[in-house]
Each structure stands twice: as C-alpha cells, then as structure tokens.
Amino acid sequence: GAVVSQHPSRVICKSGTSVKIECRSLDFQATTMFWYRQFPKQSLMLMATSNEGSKATYEQGVEKDKFLINHASLTLSTLTVTSAHPEDSSFYICSARAALAGSTDTQYFGPGTRLTVL
Amino acid sequence: GQQLNQSPQSMFIQEGEDVSMNCTSSSIFNTWLWYKQDPGEGPVLLIALYKAGELTSNGRLTAQFGITRKDSFLNISASIPSDVGIYFCAGQLGNYQLIWGAGTKLIIKP
C-alpha cells in the first residue's frame, strides 16, 4: 500500500513553454500532497502543500504564478511549471500523506520527474 | 529553510561492515523518519519513530528516537551493495511537513 506515481518521469522542453507534472496516489486517498524540488547533491526543498479542494500553500520564495498547483481530487495533484526557463531545470518530487491502517501516517513519495529546460 | 544536522556527510565502507549515521536538531520533533533515496528516484521510507526512546528495526536497519526528542540515529548492519544510496533523516511537524537533514551518502567499496 501507499504507492505514489508521477508522470512523466522525464521531460525536456524549450524555454518559454509550460510543463505539467502529475502526481497520483494509487491505492489510497490523499487529502494532502506536497511538492518538492531537489537540486543535485542537495536535500529536498518543499515548494508547496496542496490540500484537496483548496488553494495550495506556497513556501516563502516560491512563485505561485510560476508553479501552478491543482489538487482537484483525492488521488491527483498536478504541478504546472509555466513559462519554463533553464533555471527551472530540476528534479521535482511529489509526496502524499497516507493515514492507512497498518501504514505509517506520514508522507510517501513519488519517483520524481526530471525536468530539463533547454 | 530549517534543516537538521545530519552526519556524516558521506561514508566509504567495506561490504559487510556496520554503518551508523545520526541527526540532531535544536527543535523537538514528535516523529522522526529515515528515508533512503537512490539516484533518480524519490525517497523511500525506511523507519518511522514516534516515541522518545523508541528503538525500531526493519531487517538490518535499526533506528532510535532520542530521549530528548532532538536526535535520532540509524544503524545498518552487515552492509551489502544495494545499501548504496543517500540516507535522509526528517523530523515531522504537526502539519505533516518534514524538516530534512542534508543526507548521508553511503558508498560501499567492493
């Protein structure tokens, strides 16, 4: 249980285009999902917390108009990087909070999406 | 942002050796977590700790939640090649946000 998927796993795009990343909880409902980015050899940096049916809460320094988050259902959250630039190239990881019987009530992570902006 | 102090930063060990890493914080956490991340993958939860003093095992892995709730260690016994990766500690806040350590990179010499 507590499996989280992300799609796509890798994406290469041209500067100025927008990219959408999907995060799905496959075998549980997630009222809360989190979006992170990770630079090489660094720890995960929280970008935003997303609750189903409400607006995402962004961390300080993260532009909400640049990184659009939609959490329309209990199993799906999307992150759209708008007008992407090379400095947006990074590893984006989502997680979902699971509180299942027999599972730990904490975050379970997706496999990540490698974004490269040319 | 806020970060936990995780050490060592990296470890070079021989296969079969035991490994120990730890995290400390100036803040108290009610939950400590240990994750492993392989290259190009998301973190995978190894062990979750909920009570001060708690000692929990998961196969060859053992982790303890410090009595002061400000520290935790992770031990790996009899390391094998697939243990290679980056290990992260994390303290969980009440709103389920995680405060991360900087990671310990484990490298096993053949």
Image (spheres, coloured by chain):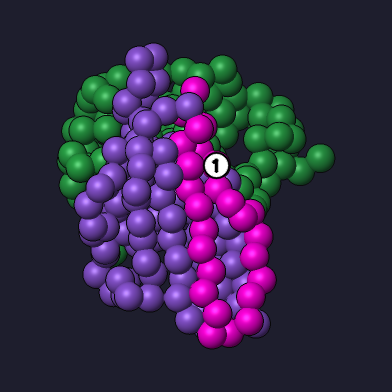
Using residue B3 as the reference point, say whether residue A35 is left or right of it.
Answer: right
Residue lying at 25% horizontally and 48% vertically, measured from the top left: A53
Give the residue type at disc 1. Ser
Q: Position of residue A20 (x, y in %)?
A: 51, 63
Q: Quadrant of the N terminus of chain B?
A: bottom left
Picture coordinates of residue A14, whole percent (x, y): 63, 81
Q: Which residues lie in the magenta part?
A: A1-26
Q: Chain of mark 1?
A: A
Return the x and y of residue B68 as percentages of the image width and height. 19, 33
Residue highlighted by disc 1: A5
* Quadrant of the frame with the C terminus of chain B: top right
Is residue A2 in the magenta section? yes
Q: Position of residue A95 (x, y in %)?
A: 42, 44
The chain coloured green in the image: B
The residue depicted at 24 percent of the width and 22 percent of the height is: B51
Which residue is most to the top?
A102
Figure chain in purple? A
Nearest the viewer among A35 and B59 is A35
Asked if residue A32 is among those painted magenta in the image, a careful observer would answer no
User: How many marks are shown on the rendered structure?
Assistant: 1
The reply to whether residue B101 is in sight is no
Question: Residue A38 versus residue B30: which sits nearer the camera?
Answer: A38
Residue appearing at x 20%, y 42% in the figure? B95
**B65 or A34, which is in the foreground?**
A34
Q: Report whether A26 appears left or right of A46.
A: right
Residue B90 image-quadrant placement = top left
Viewed as shown, does residue A37 lie left or right of B17?
A: left
Q: Secondary structure at mark 1?
A: strand
Query: In this rendering, would B3 be left or right of B76?
Result: left
Q: Is residue A45 visible?
A: yes
Relative to A76, say whether A87 is above or below: below
